[in-house]
Image (cartoon, helix red, strand yellow):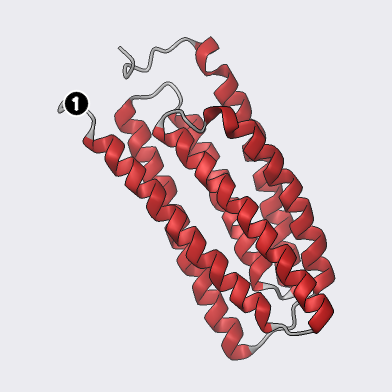
Amino acid sequence: MSDCGCEFTSQTAPERRSLRIALSLNATMFVVGLVAGVVAESTGLIADSLDMLADALAYAIGLVAINRSAFFKSRAATLSGTILLLLGIGVLVDVVRRWIFGASPESEIMLVVASLSLLVNSYVLHLLKRHKGGEVHLQATWIFTRADVIANLAVICSALFIWFTGWRYIDLIIGTGIGLYVIKEAFEILKNARSAHDNLPAAH
């Protein structure tokens, strides 16, 4: 009866609380990061903010999936992975655009916003730690957040490098790295979702 959608509310209350907090924090940081990325002309920050948006969508999907069937949850994870894949490709496209037309990233803004994002994502990662071994839709949110922490650290390193050397191309390199990492994480989520779907009974 685990797939009937009739689990007790008390069993899923911690999941709901964690996902709601994560959703609100990531949605806020997406707006902050995107605005800062545009102002600072930083591909790394823009990539990071889009990753935050993908996280917020994943948490929203995860909330909808709670108390739903295993089939629905596998489909929710597939949707999360697909969104992340598209955003990763979008980041790479932006890297090419900025490489061609140029940009002058502001290291101070990058450093402040990426550090704030790192604090937020570290807290969310700790919040979701208890759920990382859960069902596939919850595993997806853990993977999303882990990717964010790594992206934040990369942007911080990029900002420090620009600050000390003035070499702006490191931002494009970091942006490319984040984009490729996001794509790798997307494929991991899609693989887990496919595996969960393949293990479902014939009748969903």
Asked if residue 143 can be seen in this view, the reply is: yes
Q: Residue at x 69, y 59 (%)?
A: 153
Q: Residues within 10 Å of mark 1 (few under 14, many from 20)?
A: few
Q: Residue at x 68, y 45 (%)?
A: 121
Location of residue 179 in the rendering, given as x and y in whole percent from the top left corner: 52, 66
Quadrant in which residue 178 is drawn: bottom right
Query: In this picture, is 58 found above or below 133?
Result: below
Query: In this picture, is 199 found above or below 152?
Result: above
Residue carrying label 1:
201
- Quadrant containing the N terminus is top left
Query: In this picture, is 66 found above or below 22?
Result: above
Q: Residue at x 46, y 25 (%)?
A: 66
Foreground residue among 181 and 116: 181
Foreground residue among 136 and 203: 136
- Quadrant containing the C terminus is top left
Asked if residue 19 can be seen in this view, the reply is: no
Location of residue 202 in the rendering, given as x and y in whole percent from the top left corner: 15, 28
Residue type highlighted by circle 1: Pro
Quadrant in which residue 195 is drawn: top left
Location of residue 28 in the rendering, given as x and y in whole percent from the top left corner: 71, 47
Q: Residue at x 63, y 39 (%)?
A: 125
